[in-house]
Amino acid sequence: MSARCLREPDARALSACIAGGGIALIPTDTVYGLACDPESEEAVRRLYALKGRKPDKPAAVMFFALEHALAHLGALPERVEKAVAALLPGPVTLLLENPSSRFPLACDPARRASTAVLGVRVPRWRPEHASLRSVSLPVLQSSANLSGGADPCELDAVPASMRSSADLVLDGGELPGVASTVLDLTSLQSSGRWRLLRDGALSAREAELALAHVGERC
C-alpha cells in the first residue's frame, strides 16, 4: 500500500477550505471522504447533493486530533470517557448521547427528527498524513462515494463528479479501503452495554477487547 505524504501547507489549505464554506475531498485512516463545515447549511446541502444522500440520513462529525474532539464534546460520562479513550483515535465511528444537541446539521440534516445522538470520528493518521492533526476545525464527514456505492481506497476510485466539484482535493495515495466500524455507545453509561452497528476496519473482537473494562456487547 503506497501513501502520499501530506504536509503543513495541505493542512492549512484544508482549514481554509472548511472555514470558507467549501467541500474538501480528503484521505482518512480508512477510505476517502468528503468534508465540510458541520455548522454551514449550504456546505452540508452541497455535500449531500454530491453524494445523492438522503437529507434525513445523519453523518459523523470528524475531528483531526483527539484533543480537538474532547474540547468540543466537553465533559463526558465516566464510562463513555473511558470508551472514547480506549477507541480513539482509530478506525471507528462512535455514536454518543448528545443531550446538548451539538452539531444539529450532522445529527439531523433535514431537521425533522431528534439530535440526541452524535456520530464522532477521530482517525488514526498514518505517518504520511500526520500533518492533518494540526487542523483544529471539526468537519461533517462522509465517504466519497455515491450513496450506496463502493468505498474508495484511491483518489481515482472517487466519482469524477465529486473530484471536479470539490473545492479542495488532497491525494493521500492508496488507503486501506474498509470503512470505519460503527459502535453505538448511547446506552453505555446507563446500562454498561454497547452495540456493534456496522462491521468495518476495527474487528468486533478488537472492539470487545478495547471495551472489556467499560461494558459488554449486547
Image (tube, grey):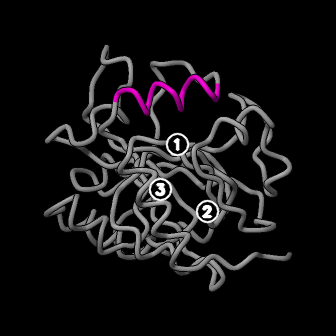
Task: Using the image, determine if residue 174 lies above or below residue 189.
Answer: below
Q: What amino acid type should be assigned to the residue bearing mark 1?
A: Ile
Please state if 107 lies on the left or on the right of 182 as rendered: left
Contact, CB < 8 Å: mark 1 with mark 2? no
Please state if 157 lies on the left or on the right of 57 as rendered: right
Task: Using the image, determine if residue 82 lies above or below residue 183.
Answer: below
Please state if 123 lies on the left or on the right of 70 as rendered: right
Please state if 39 lies on the left or on the right of 183 as rendered: left
**Quadrant of the rendering where the N terminus is positioned:** bottom right
> For mark 1, what is the residue?
23
Question: How packed is label 3: few (under 14 Cα within 10 Å), some, or many (20 or more)?
Answer: some
Counting every numbered tag in the picture gives: 3
Q: Residue at x 40, y 72 (%)?
A: 65
Q: CA distance from mark 1 to mark 2?
A: 15 Å
Q: Of helix, strand and loop, which one carries label 3?
A: strand
Q: CA distance from mark 3 to mark 2?
A: 27 Å
Question: How packed is label 2: few (under 14 Cα within 10 Å), some, or many (20 or more)?
Answer: many
**Of residues 185 and 37, the one drawn nearer to the viewer in this rendering:** 37
Query: In x, y percent, where is residue 5?
Result: 69, 79
Contact, CB < 8 Å: mark 3 with mark 1? no
> For mark 2, what is the residue?
28
Q: Of helix, strand and loop, which one carries label 1?
A: loop
Which of the 4 image quarters holds residue 124? bottom right
Q: What amino acid type should be assigned to the residue bearing mark 2?
A: Thr
Which comes before the other along the chain, label 1 or label 2?
1
Q: Of helix, strand and loop, which one carries label 2?
A: loop
Query: Over which residues does the magenta segment extend?
Result: 41-51
> For mark 3, what is the residue?
217
Q: Residue at x 66, y 51 (%)?
A: 199
